Every structure is written in structure tokens, then in C-alpha cells.
Image: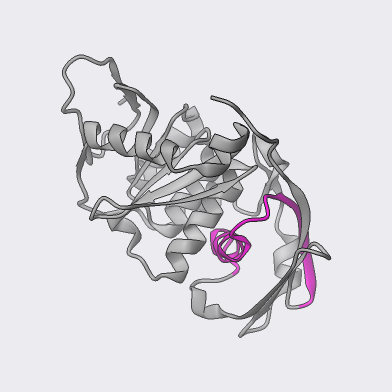
């Protein structure tokens, strides 16, 4: 496959009710979705209705958000920052202990492993930035009717925030959706999935031991190494049925 370009990343400052949250390295696509997704994932908003206005200036490299209610900056900045693993050196304000306080997932959504592998392949074919550069992460949601929606970014956390923002803005029921990502599933990725309420999360690569433990606690099904005709089912929530005969499927109980 011929690559025609390099992936882009830009420093973009997020300003909330006049207060600078941080400077993020982002790919300049679907920035409004990212804003909704990041603010929700970090507990700064509870729904899309909490945002009054968003002003995005690519020229100045800023995203200015106005909330309908006051923003308690002292409470926000008094919380300990946790630097995320992997690309982008992201920041989350939720610790492992905080995430364990999230609601456990009670969805009865069930899918076959063969279906998940098929959708993972469809996801790959519908990731134009990755096809163009080979250096972009993606996140995808699978709707109940089988249709998919993809968001891409230089950072795996940013891509997941973008797809969460898309789902949040469109008032989708998370327990009926499936989340796929190209990146490693670490505890902060489970945090994002759990905060929104995804019942099933899959990746083309691995999940960390800490993420698996957290997913079990929150009753989230995690499937990794979705490649070709193989996968690793890390949890035992009963939402992904192994209907394949030949491939090696590792089930971690």
C-alpha cells in the first residue's frame, strides 16, 4: 500500500469558561466531537446539553467552550493529574479508584466473534487518514443495525473521545453500541468506555492487565487482537460468543 503523506498533529488549547484546561496534541478533524467527548469523559459535563457554545479557531489553535453553569476551576485543578500511557502523553483526572465508582454495565447486548472480526475489517477499510498515512489511530462505534461510524486522530485517546462525543451529541444509547479502537486498551481507555456506558470494547491490539481487572469489575466485555480470524477474549461477561472453529482464541478468565 502506497503512503502519500505524514500524519498531522497540532497544539490546541482547550479553554473552559475562560479557564485554560491544557494544551493537547490533536489532529484537526472532528474537533467539536472531541470537545464534547473529552469534557464528558473527564466528568466536566454530564450531557451535550451542558454546553452553551463552542468556538474553534484553527488559526489561533484554541477551542473555547462556554458552559450553561459555572465551572469550578479550583475543584478541577486540585485533582491529581494522571498521565496516560502511549501516544500523545494525555492527561486524565480520574484515578483507578475514581473509575471503580462508575456504574457497572448491565447491557444484554450479545454478538458473535465472527461478526466482530468482520466489523473490525470494515473499520480498517473506512479509516481514510490511516490509509493515507499509516500513522493515525482510529475509534469506531458499531450500531445495532450493523452500520459504523469512524473517527481518527494522532492519539488513541483523542480518537475515542471523538467517537464518544459523536455518540453523545446524537443521544445514542451506549449499551446498544460496540466500541472498537486501533490502540492498546489501558485503564484510562476502560475509564472512557465505562463513563459513557459501552458494554463491549474491542481492539486490534492488546489490553493491559490493569484494564482487564477494571473491565471485570465494571462488567465490560473486552476483546483484543482482532486480526484476520483470531482474537483474545479477555473477560467473561458472556456478550461475545466464540462461533469460530479454527482460529486460536485466548479466553482470559
Residue 228 in magenta stretch: no
Residue 39 falls inside the magenta stretch? yes
* Residue 196 location (% of width, % of height): 43, 59
Viewer-proximal residue, 45 or 182? 182
Which quadrant of the structure image shows residue 231?
Answer: top left
- The reply to whether residue 222 is in sight is no
**Residue at left 54%, top 56%?**
162
Task: Identify which residue is drawn at 25% across, 16% down.
Answer: 247
Give the left or right position of residue 162, taking residue 11 as reference.
Answer: left
Q: Is residue 109 left or right of residue 197?
A: left
How far from the left and from the top, in percent, is residue 34?
59, 59
- Residue range (magenta): 18-44
Instruction: Tell me the residue at 44%/43% (across/down).
Output: 126
Q: Residue furthest right?
A: 60
- Quarter of the image for residue 7 reads top right
The image position of residue 135, as x and y in percent, is 63, 33
- Nearer the observer, 198 or 27: 27
Amino acid at each position: 500500500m502506497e503512503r502519500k503523506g505524514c500524519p498531522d498533529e497540532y497544539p490546541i488549547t482547550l479553554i473552559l469558561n475562560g479557564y485554560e484546561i491544557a494544551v493537547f496534541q490533536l489532529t484537526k478533524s472532528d474537533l467539536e466531537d472531541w470537545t464534547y467527548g473529552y469534557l464528558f469523559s473527564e466528568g466536566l459535563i454530564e450531557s451535550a446539553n451542558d454546553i452553551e457554545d463552542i468556538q474553534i479557531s484553527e488559526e489561533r489553535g484554541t477551542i473555547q467552550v462556554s458552559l450553561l453553569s459555572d465551572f469550578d476551576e479550583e475543584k478541577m485543578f486540585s485533582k491529581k493529574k494522571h498521565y496516560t500511557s502511549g501516544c500523545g502523553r494525555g492527561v486524565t483526572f480520574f484515578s483507578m479508584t475514581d473509575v471503580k465508582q462508575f456504574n457497572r454495565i448491565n447491557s444484554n447486548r450479545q454478538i458473535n466473534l465472527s461478526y466482530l472480526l468482520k466489523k473490525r475489517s470494515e473499520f480498517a477499510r473506512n479509516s481514510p487518514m490511516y490509509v493515507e498515512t499509516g500513522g493515525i489511530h482510529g475509534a469506531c462505534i458499531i450500531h445495532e443495525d450493523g452500520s459504523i461510524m469512524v473517527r481518527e486522530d494522532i492519539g488513541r485517546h483523542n480518537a475515542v473521545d471523538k467517537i464518544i462525543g459523536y455518540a453523545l451529541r446524537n443521544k445514542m444509547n451506549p449499551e446498544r453500541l460496540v466500541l472498537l479502537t486501533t490502540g492498546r486498551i489501558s485503564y484510562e481507555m476502560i475509564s472512557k468506555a465505562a463513563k459513557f456506558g459501552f458494554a463491549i470494547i474491542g481492539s486490534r491490539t492488546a489490553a493491559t492487565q490493569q484494564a482487564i481487572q477494571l473491565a471485570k469489575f465494571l462488567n465490560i466485555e473486552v476483546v483484543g487482537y482482532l486480526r484476520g480470524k483470531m482474537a483474545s477474549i479477555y473477560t467473561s461477561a458472556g456478550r461475545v460468543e466464540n462461533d469460530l472453529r479454527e482460529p486460536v482464541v485466548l479466553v482470559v478468565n
